[in-house]
Image (cartoon, rainbow, N blue to C red):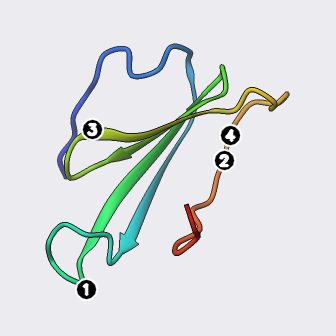
Amino acid sequence: MQSWSLKDAHDEPLSMVRLFDVAGGGGGGGANSSSSLIASGDEGGGLKIWDVRAKKQVRIFWIEFCEFLLTNMCLLVGASQ
């Protein structure tokens, strides 16, 4: 297992981290390939999606209307963007 670190990846303390293995997720291996994504949420409503293979963030969301701490999430594969 490999790991990497990024100083100041979030402005607020983390409240959740979730790993998703996505089949057919690219990587140049065709439909049978997979990629791993990590979602990390913070106490300020920040949600970041990270590509494990590329070791970089791929999406950033801010959930300003949420009154509660972000502690979990699910990934809907094939959902329209």
Residue furthest bottom in the image: 32
Q: Nearer the viewer, mark 2 or mark 3?
A: 3
Lower sequence index among marks 3 and 1: 1
User: Residue 36's spot in the image, x, y percent?
Assistant: 33, 59
Within 10 Å of disc 3 (Cα), the crowding (few <14, some 14-19, many 20+) is: few
In the image, is residue 55 above or below residue 81? above
Give the label on residue 32, or none: 1
Q: Residue under circle 4?
A: 71
Can you say whether 71 is above or below 18 in the image? Answer: above
Compare marks 1 and 2 and give the one earlier in the sequence.
1
Quarter occupied by the C terminus: bottom right
What amino acid is at disc 4?
Thr
Residue 72 bears which disc, if any?
2
- For label 2, the crowd category at 10 Å Cα-Cα, with few meaning under 14, some 14 to 19 and many 20 or more, is few
Marks 1 and 2, how far apart in space?
28 Å
- Tell me if 47 is positioned left or right of 66 in this view: left
* Residue ID for mark 3: 56
| Residue 68 image point, x, y percent | 82, 30
Q: Regarding mark 1 in the picture, which secondary structure is present there? A: loop
Q: Residue furthest right?
A: 67
Q: From the top left corner, tell me how far across and down residue 31 is, in percent.
A: 27, 85
Label pair 2/4, CB-CB below 8 angstroms = yes
**Labels 1 & 2 near each other (Cβ < 8 A):** no
